[in-house]
Image (cartoon, rainbow, N blue to C red):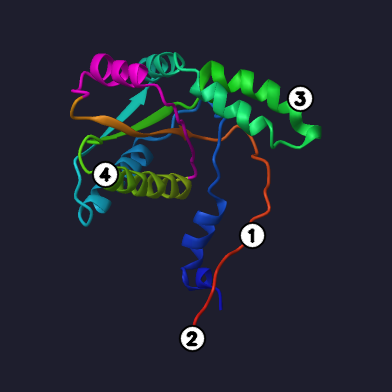
Amino acid sequence: MKYTNKLPNVVFKTIESRRTIRKYKSVMPTEDAIRRISEVPSFILQDFIIPFTLVILQYWAKERAVNIINQTYSITRDLAILYNIVPDNLKEWWRNYMKEFIKTLGGAPIMFVGLTDLTYNRNYHFSVSWMIAQAMMVQARAEGLDTGPVGFSAKTVEEEFVNYFLRMDYNKWQIAFVLNCGYRDEEPLSRQIKEGIYEIH
């Protein structure tokens, strides 16, 4: 028996259908859906206590965040690396896709930003933060929404984002994850997944 079969079917189907999405419709999710997704961290933090803050960005605030993040070249770099593993028949499509994604970072109507203290106990705080991010992505899928992480690595840009945009102390709060959220406007490429599940009796 596979371990996945032990999950309730609705939970398994939710996890199975979750994909990373990089292009979104402009339709705003409902307030109830956003509220339920934003409540997810509180459940994780009951057992894994870390300093953590979740910021929800929408409308002009989300557009401002995109402009700040786009000051770093790391997103373009990461997409260019992925270009090397895209099949030859899709490379032209990927080039156009890259250009469009970089302009708006996918155009998602909602952006969730998770912040924690990475100056102390960095690995643990980062791991728990991403546990929260994963749970939020599953909850978003249960709401009929999709998500996609936005990764960037530029300390000066991150410091501007935290200090001057969010008006938080960068010495205390650093970005653990950024998640786009909304209704998908694409069907992601299908990938073959190889299982690595072993049973020992």
Q: Amino acid at mark 3?
A: Glu
Q: CA distance from mark 3 to mark 1?
A: 27 Å
Q: Amino acid at mark 2?
A: His
Identify the residue at the far bottom of this view.
Answer: 201
Q: Earlier in the sequence, mark 3 or mark 2?
A: 3
Q: Amino acid at mark 1?
A: Lys
Q: CA distance from mark 4 to mark 1?
A: 30 Å
Q: Amino acid at mark 4?
A: His
* Circle 4 SS class: helix
Magenta region, residue range: 144-170
* Circle 3 SS class: helix
**Which residue lies at the image location 38% right of the left edge and 45% below the top edge?**
136
Q: Is residue 46 magenta?
A: no
Q: Earlier in the sequence, mark 2 or mark 1?
A: 1
**Which residue lies at the image location 71% right of the left edge and 36% below the top edge?**
86
Q: Which residue is mark 3?
A: 92
Return the x and y of residue 122 as percentages of the image width and height: 27, 41
Q: Which residue is mark 1?
A: 194
Q: CA distance from mark 4 to mark 3?
A: 40 Å
Q: Which residue is mark 2?
A: 201
Return the x and y of residue 78 as percentages of the image width and height: 55, 29
Picture mark count: 4
In the picture, the quarter occupied by the N terminus is: bottom right
Q: Which residue is mark 4?
A: 125
Q: Earlier in the sequence, mark 2 or mark 4?
A: 4
**Which residue lies at the image location 45% right of the left edge and 50% below the top edge?**
142
Judging depth in this view, the residue of 101 and 50 nearest the camera is 50
Q: Mark 1: few, some, or many residues within 10 Å (few <14, many ≥20)? A: few
Give residue 184's quadrant in the image. Answer: top right
Q: CA distance from mark 2 to mark 1?
A: 22 Å
